[in-house]
Image (spheres, helix red, strand yellow):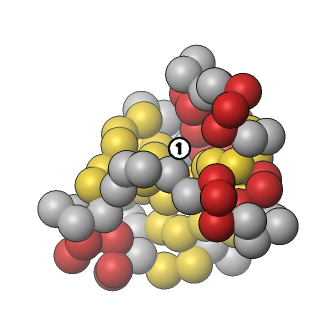
Amino acid sequence: MTTTFKQARKIAREYRAKTWQPHEGTLYVAKEGYEDELGWLVVVGARELLVDDDEGFMPNDDRVIVVDKATGEVTELNMVFDAQRLEAMRPTE
């Protein structure tokens, strides 16, 4: 089974919704993302930040969600420690 980007967006939303708190804003999944040969980086966060550019909703951590293309499994990568992989990802089409 190969996970499509559309499926990855749904998986990432469900994953993040499990721990999302009302004070974090309106949960939003961007239509754009990034990919490499192994996974989809799905941009998930507060709509107030991602759409409205309200920096008051900037997250306090350095984690991003990657959904494995082969299995659909979610992994959280650290933007600092996993920078090499993340910088090599290309925008989804």
**How many marks are shown on the rendered structure?**
1
Q: Is residue 65 left or right of residue 85?
A: right
Q: Position of residue 41 (x, y in %)?
A: 49, 58
Q: Residue furthest right?
A: 52
- Provide residue 49's location: percent of width, then percent of height: 71, 61
Q: Is residue 90 above or below residue 19?
A: below
The residue closer to the viewer here, 12 or 8, is 12
- Pick whichever, 32 or 81, lies toward us: 81
Q: Residue at x 58, y 18 (%)?
A: 18
For the point 65% across and 58% down, the residue is 56
Looking at the image, which residue sits at the far top?
Answer: 18
- Locate residue 69, reporting x and y percent: 46, 48
Q: Secondary structure at mark 1?
A: loop
Q: Which residue is mark 1?
A: 2
Residue 83 lies in what quarter of the image?
A: bottom left
Please give the name of the residue rendered at 64% of the width and 66% of the height, measured from the top-left corner.
55
Residue 78 to residue 73: above or below? below
Task: Give the position of the C terminus as an image quadrant.
Answer: bottom right
Residue toward you, 34 or 18: 18
Q: Is residue 69 visible?
A: no
Within 10 Å of disc 1 (Cα), the crowding (few <14, some 14-19, many 20+) is few
Would residue 71 be found to the left or right of residue 13 on screen? left
User: How far across and down, in percent of the image, does residue 74 sit?
Assistant: 42, 35
Quarter of the image where one finds residue 22:
top right
Asked whether residue 21 appears in the rendered view, the answer is yes
What kind of residue is marked 1? Thr
Name the residue furthest left: 81
